[in-house]
Image (cartoon, rainbow, N blue to C red):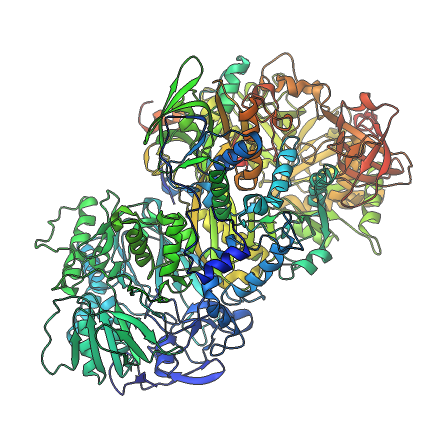
Amino acid sequence: MIRIPCPFCGERDHSEFHYGGDGSITYPALDAPTEDWLNAVYQRKNIRGVQIETWHHVNGCRMWLLVERDTITHEIHLVRAAHDGVDGVLKGRT
Amino acid sequence: MTRFSAWSVFWNGLTNQMGWKPQWRTPELKADYDVVIVGGGLHGLATAYYLAKNHGISKIAVLEKGWLGGGNAGRNTTIVRSNYVMPGNREFYERSLKLWENLSFDLNYNVMFSQRGHVTLLHSPEAIDAAARRYNTMRLTGSDAEIWSLEELKRNIPHLNYAADARFPIFGAAVQRRAGTARHDAVVWGYARAADKRGVEIIQNCEVLGVTRENGHITRLETSRGNVGVKKVGFAVAGNTSLLWEMAGLGTLPIESHILQAFVTEPVKPLLDQVLVFGVGGANFYMSQSDKGGLVFGGDIDWYKSYAQRGNLPIVQDVAECALSIMPCLGRVRLLRHWGGVVDMSMDGSHFICKTPLDNLYLNAGWNYGGFKASPGSGWYFSDLIANDRPHSDIVNHDLKRFERGHTIDERGAGPDPKLHG
Amino acid sequence: MSARRLSHGGRIDRAKTISFDWEGRKLTGYPGDTLASALMAGGQRVIGRSFKYHRPRGIMSAGVEESGAIVTLGDGAWRDPNVKATTQELYDGLVARGQHAWPNLHFDMGGVANFFSRFLPAGFYYKTFMGMPPFEWGSGTGWWMRYEKLIRRAAGMGTASRAPDPDAYEHAHAFCDLLVVGSGPAGLSAALVAAQSGLEVILVEQDFEFGGDLLNQANPESETKRIELLSAIHTAGVRTMSRTTAFGLYENSVAGLVERVTDHLANPADYLPRQRFWTVRSKQTVLATGALERLIAFGNNDRPGIMSANAGRTYLNRYGVLPGENIIVVTNNDSPYQPALELAKAGATVHLIDARTTTPELEKGCGVSVKSESIPIKAHGSKGIRGLESTASEGIQSCDLLLVSGGWSPVVHLLSHRGIKLVWDAQIACFLPGDTDAPIHVAGSAAGIWGSKDCGASGQVAAAKALGQLGHDIKLPTGKISRGSGWDLPIKPLYEIKVPGRKLQSFVDLQHDVTSEDVRLAHREGFQSVEHLKRFTTLGMATDQGKMGNIIGMALMAEALGKNIHDMGTTTFRPPYTPVSLGALGGRHVDSNFRPIRRTPLHDWNLSNGAIMTLAGLWDRPWYFPREGETIEDAYIREATVARKSVGLCDITSLGKIAVQGPDTAEFLNRIYTNPFAKLSIGKARYGIMLRDDGMVMDDGTCWRLTETDYFMTTTTAHAATVMVWLEELLQVRWPDLKVHVTSVSDQWAGCTVAGPNSRAVLEACVTDPTLISNETCPFMGVIETTLTGAIPSRIARISFSGELAFEVYVPSDYGPSMMDLLFNASKPLDGCLYGLEALGTLRIEKGHVTGAELDGRVTIEDAGLGKMASKQKSYIGDVLRKRPVMLDKNRARLVGIFPKDRTQRFNAGTILCKPGAISGFGEGWITGATYSPALGHWIGIGFISGGFESWVGQTVVVADPVRDQNINVEIVLPQMFDPAGKRSHD
């Protein structure tokens, strides 16, 4: 069981979360060139090591999180709210 | 090389088994080869075998970083079937199944392919209709396929949960009789031995550490056993494809590595004669009984991306719940082992056997859940691609450019999310 | 016979006799016995049969490593195969019998395999059974499958019950600072130090008593020590759990435990689960899991009456059973000397054979003779040992018990689960835990420390390390504890006995009948890596997972390769450490709790109004409402007819409902739907299509604008959760700048469709202000918020899935049944009816409306016939990638309607549309839905065909259904088969 320290709820089992995917992807504008969309939707870095990914606390606060996790050891290095504004509020950056 | 037969087994019984030789040689890595296959799993070995057998290529090496069959070849649930419906997949898996049917003879190695039937339980009239589309297509494209009524199912598999008030009552089943299971390790060894016999050099403990390119062409591979010159290179390294791809300087792939677990129970006397599939209410579960007597289970992937060859608890529980849901008599049967394999999950759930941006590099990857059953077909089509430098007409759309064209081969309709293509 | 119960000693309670049934015979034992100790005391020697050669096997150990005494417990639905007699507590009325033998344990026909064993070495099956001439030459699998049937029958072990397991299981959860696994001196000491330093500690022990090796000692001081420690840890607040196995260690120090709650009880209370599966989340873990004694491979080393030396001691000291009167002990290390002395003191004759040159000094008159530099060669006797041939004496030295100690293997399985590498220690001949940064600390003999006192000290060190990692300022105890401490003289590695010129059948893996020769055969055939050895010979793959035999197998392979064991590596141990019942893993998540069923707030109302229910995904929904004597077909045809003629009511609560709120909602909706939403006016609803990023249709539904910033979205039942997660992702991850909030309100609103020409009349009778329902105030796609009679708040939109004048009415869930009463009562005078999913399907197929059967994730908006809803004026999710060439191909399969040529014929969904004369291959399309259409008076279908309707005008198409039915001819029509202009819904 991976334990994910949710910034809103505290440390929780990963089974409470829904795994999103690669968190390093920047989705292009809705009218961006096809190539950009192809890259964002289909191409993956598939890192063996520490990667940024998204998780959704679907059976909890329902917040989307950005998580830095090692894909070999499953060690988690960092968790923050995916929403920048919310993350700012959490960290007192308002 | 000793030919295997009842006679050779008998004779060696009389002579203290002293007549057996290594099933494959242990050659040193040579300076160059016509074809180097990276990956000594099932797909790599099968490819080398068919390159030698069907295409008459003689200087072939298979490089394996660990021991033969140490990846997903030895970590799967040993199911062989061809119940795919999408054009391309249909022909591919049907050819693979036909190769399976003759594989023991072809390799002179009993791979224990047991065509015991593959039974997918159906839990509503709508599910029967949805399965019928798939199974009708199978029949029309030259495969075998049946829909069993509830009565027929009860006759064949007596101790399923047939209670009318079951959480998911059973209405019938979709069946492929020619499907079944095989002994996974034996297939690895059979291909290795047969390829070796045809001159293929299998080099274990030989890890590729670097790829040297010149003008869109690979000239050399650096390995833990020295450098090797190449005319053509094939990658068949499920689970680690992205790493090798990047090593070749080719950027990203439409692939993510995930963990697929397998489970086996303590052996019990024969309890289930078929491969059973249970997929309703989000469940994704399959089981069969090995010849040794252990019940072999498979379930969902672990959801999160992973390169660790071990599985996690939630899926263990989920698989037990599924098993008990369809066979409530299993409560006292004990789980003996569970383990995980790293699979390439592709963006549409289908594989790649294709040319690449480099003119002498060929790719075999993205097997999702389907790698084991695909092995003979994969070797057959991949060797055909490497030898002739063009894809066979059946697999023209199993290339990396299919997403650009919008030609996704999505058996589940799950869309561009690798974890959903279970 | 030899073994007998002593009149005193041991931890059994002789005051109370327990009777049990073994192979149909009544035997007795005492509380504190295991099944194995009671069988041994009862003079039973052959307890099991081996897997492959069906050789007789007896009790070989006193614990989880047992590979001989494996039995079946219980009868009928309670039948429990493959139980280790050495770990099963005895209880009154226990029923056990041998397994894997026919007709019985003592005379097993399977034993003939042993005579042919020379022809059945490891992997023989790979080399034969490839067809039998002249029946099968060069193709097919038929003959192999005939052999396979025989092989399967011969294999397996116990027989599982065919009846559902009647017992209940449960899941439990726990948290702690430190989990200590094992309650020997190391575990107890670790728990004590940690708890006294303020940690929350859980101590688990697989045995039914705490104490580990302290339970097996003869000296009273050990017991005093054990009681002291136990009492101290309880005082310090340690939570202790016995009969509980930590079977697996997972990420983040999460352990899987199984607690056997009633397996030892004769009459367990009804409310108790049989077993409890624990998920323990700890911060630190101490593994004090002990070590297991190894055997040595010599001739017939599997005979009943051969067991580990420590087992001999355990049966004596713990169970008060003298396991033999005339005992030979063979060893290569110090550990069996104490057991030998204790057995001699208990009255046995004991001869010790030590492979080493220098042996420990024994006192004169201790009753144990020692022969150094001697090794065993071959055991004699078949169903029980009679004597041993060894280098210690000429001929066969008679004995009735042979104790063996080939060294010890620390139990490091749980570390291995975490991927921590093991390191071979040549000095003490075992694998030890390698270094790790993980919060796992190994103590006691699991770390290669053999002496009891040193084990205790190492437990304290482990606890101190755990405390240190948790930030406690604690000094590590001083004093050096070295590996192998507890032995005065070094071990002399000894794995196999070979005598030149003699063929000895010596076993490496006793349960799977892997012999030394098999290991050498594997070497000869090139299976030389540890994993190949394991897979080729099946070494270590039996129910004991190679606890006894793996090391010997590796040693033999290393020898054959001319390598050291540490160059061989080791296989990875997989969880679980000992097998875990599926029942425990499933817990309560079975039967109706497996994927719990979802019911609408109208469920009971539907049932009381005669609904027959069906499953739709996880939902239980009304299928049809039969009147007396009606079949499902009669019922749905009537219901659909009434809905078109008068009015029908249908529970649609399972649709997903999402409150979308905030100043940027219009912009948000405009981005996620393909059709324009920016200018939806207040009080209007719109049908909308959502695409995935890849341009395929994700879902369809409606969105109602209630106020400037408040919208009410409906989704399909199947995609309700997916869409909700998707919207949250878009708002939180992709478009954090949008000021929009989404809330799932699916459970808050109950919904009913009122469909049919009389639907307005029904609603008028139910709303407080009937004028609101007029065509002017509530036109097609109009939305009103009002109250129903009785001040029931409601939202009503004029939306039609059926193609009739229709309204969707939503009320807060608790008002659902009241709403249904109102609507149903109002529809009765108009001869209205309730309708279910089947009629719903009929109505929508008649109209060519798509559902999940069509929108299967591979369909573009054009494929679904909804191309007009793809706006050209704006950009939206999926817009770019939906325009890829293959997706815009005009020849893609497009939505169509299907009529049978002969209108009296019917056909199925799931069928393939083919050109006449070309009924093979992938065909031209497929049918997703079929129904009898009361409105049209014949069967109709909906499906997809290449190029769509235009390509097939006037042509005959064949519906092929080879798996179910005959082929019939059909024609292709437009999907809108009834009222194509949509006059009825628009009034």
Of residues C15 and C338, which is closer to you in this image? C338
* Left or right position of B4 against C472: right
Query: Above or below — where is B250 with respect to C142?
Result: above
Tell me the residue at 30%/79% (across/down): C387
* Left or right position of C960 against C687: right
Say if residue C576 shows up in the picture: no
Q: State which quadrant residue C969 falls in.
A: top right
Q: What percent of the width, then of the height, locates residue C61?
A: 32, 70
Q: State which quadrant residue A9 falls in.
A: top left
Q: What percent of the width, then of the height, locates residue B151?
A: 73, 58
Quadrant that contains the N terminus of chain C: bottom left
Query: Above or below — where is A34 with respect to C237?
Result: above
Q: What percent of the width, then of the height, locates residue C823?
A: 74, 42
Q: State which quadrant residue C837 falls in.
A: top right
Of residues B269 and A94, which is closer to you in this image? B269
Of residues C188 and B409, which is closer to you in this image? B409
Quadrant that contains the C terminus of chain C: top right
* Left or right position of C211 against B229: left
Tell me the residue at 29%/64% (across/down): C500
Query: Above or below — where is C152 with respect to C664?
Result: below
